Amino acid sequence: MEETPQTPASQLRDAIAVFTRQTQEFHASGALALADDGEAIGIMTAAGDALRAAESLLIAGAGTIQQRSATADVAERLTTRLGCGSVSDVIQLTTRVAGATARKMLRVAQATTPNRSITTGEELPAALPALREALHDGAAGIDAAFTIVGALQPRGRILEPALVAIADQALSATVRGDEFDPATGETKTNATMPATADVIRIHATAWASAIDPDGAEPIEQAALRKRGVTLGTVRDGLVELHGLILPEGAEQIQRFFDAVGTPRHTRVSFSDSEHRPEHCACEDTKNCRCADDNVVDPRTAAQKGHDALVMAFTIAAASEDAPMLGGAAPTLLVMADETALATGHGTAFLPATGATVPLAAAHHAACAGTIQRVTLEDGRVTNISSPQRIFTSNQRRAISLRDGGCVIPGCQVPAAWCEIHHVDEHARGGETHTDNGVLLCWFHHRYLEISGWTIRMQEGVPEVRAPGWIDPTGRWRRNTTSSLRLTRRAHRLKQPPGTTGRRRTSAAPPEI
């Protein structure tokens, strides 16, 4: 019996089936875990090549299905004969990808699939032939290709074909690691590393700006219509933030995030052998109470971003230029029963969101802001006290001069962004005095009770005690980022022993 010869399509399908089976056997053997570094990286590189090759087949297939489903007669369309409502449905059912991925494949396929002339039936070149070639060669994947198509074929705009052709060549060369000279039309091969999808996005943005300088205006108009930020409801102690922000707004927010969340790369254990004399003026280094400032911040980047955002709005609300809300600044309002605050049992409430929060939030708000007592009897308001103002602007300036910024070692939040913490709580009789106030950033102030850090005042100077995992000795140490105090310490170190500026031991706190 004579066998029917295989077509190229069936041969490739069988080869893919062999590859799939070998991959399954490889996983079952656990060979990857036993491979050395070179072999593991080699497998990753080869898998990347296979992935791009597979994506090129999927894109080509999507283009073919699209063409065979574009007939005027609905009954003759391939999608209809397959029982699908759209080409995207066919892609999703055959590949199991998400709808968004299927639409990306279709968008790239439309730009890289040759068309047929309606009148002559002649094959016409693809809109982006260089990208088509890069896909077929396995140089470009779906992510890079989609980025290039989006830049060179923006929706709702028709660009100069000659300029699009040049950009197509240049970006496709960048994908391969080549360098295309638009002036001469020459390509220098292997000029650089093959570009990742993220790098291609940067190049594509630059080319889009060059060939379509007016393109940013309609995009901006659409962005202005779509911009917005909303707060969700409280769920599991969190509120979801939704929205779209204009690029310059996002840039400003990111700059603030960077300023607040700059990581520290060194760790300190406060051991005696690690004593660094440039940080203090103490002769007795063994009992020195001057803290180092290189404690690692345990928060993630996302957590730092959250704290920076809250800090920014807290600072803005306290500004004299902030808009008024009900005749007062739009500062945080936390409600709590006085008995609950006194006993420590109960919860507090946030009226704007309707959220229930721990009493720690009320203590934090009371410490950093003002307290107003309202007396209710059988639902009737019988007494309203005047708000008790906390630290004045003059006191803040003085405390800022002394502390320099957040007093927790390793924290780099400057004084202007800090809140003032009552070391002895105001609600328990603590005075609103510079001898009882220290600078803390929003995060360290809000979670001071559970962070493990402890603060006390010694003759008007704050001292901190680190959590046990940082400093097992539990010693109290002084910490400041005040340029004035640090400079005066440095001057004392330069003075020889026996002079009037003799360094003090830690038996008495060094004078500032």
Image: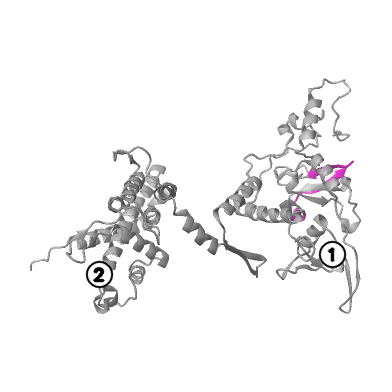
Q: Which mark is residue 411?
A: none
* Horizontal side, residue 310 vs residue 280: left or right: left
Pointer 2 residue = 68
Q: Residue at x 40, y 58 (%)?
A: 154
Question: Which image quarter holds the N terminus?
Answer: bottom left
* Horizontal side, residue 189 vs residue 234: left or right: left
Q: Position of residue 454 (x, y in %)?
A: 79, 49
**Nearest to viewer (mark 2 / mark 1):** 2
Q: Is residue 448 magenta?
A: yes
Q: Give the magenta-colored segment's residue range.
A: 446-464
Q: Position of residue 35 (x, y in %)?
A: 39, 47
Nearer to us in this view, 333 or 296? 333
The image quadrant that residue 190 belongs to is top left
The image quadrant that residue 289 belongs to is top right
| Residue type, label 1 | Leu
* Horizontal side, residue 334 vs residue 217: left or right: right
How many neighbours does mark 2 have within 10 angstroms: few (below 14), some (14-19), or many (20 or more)? some
- Residue 449 seen by the camera: yes
Q: Residue at x 75, y 49 (%)?
A: 418
Give the total number of marks visible in the rendering.
Answer: 2
Question: Which image quarter holds the C terminus?
Answer: top right
Q: Position of residue 438 (x, y in %)?
A: 81, 47
Q: Position of residue 450 (x, y in %)?
A: 74, 55
Pointer 1 residue = 341
Q: Is residue 494 magenta?
A: no
- Residue 475 seen by the camera: no
| Residue type, label 2 | Arg
Q: Secondary structure at mark 1?
A: helix
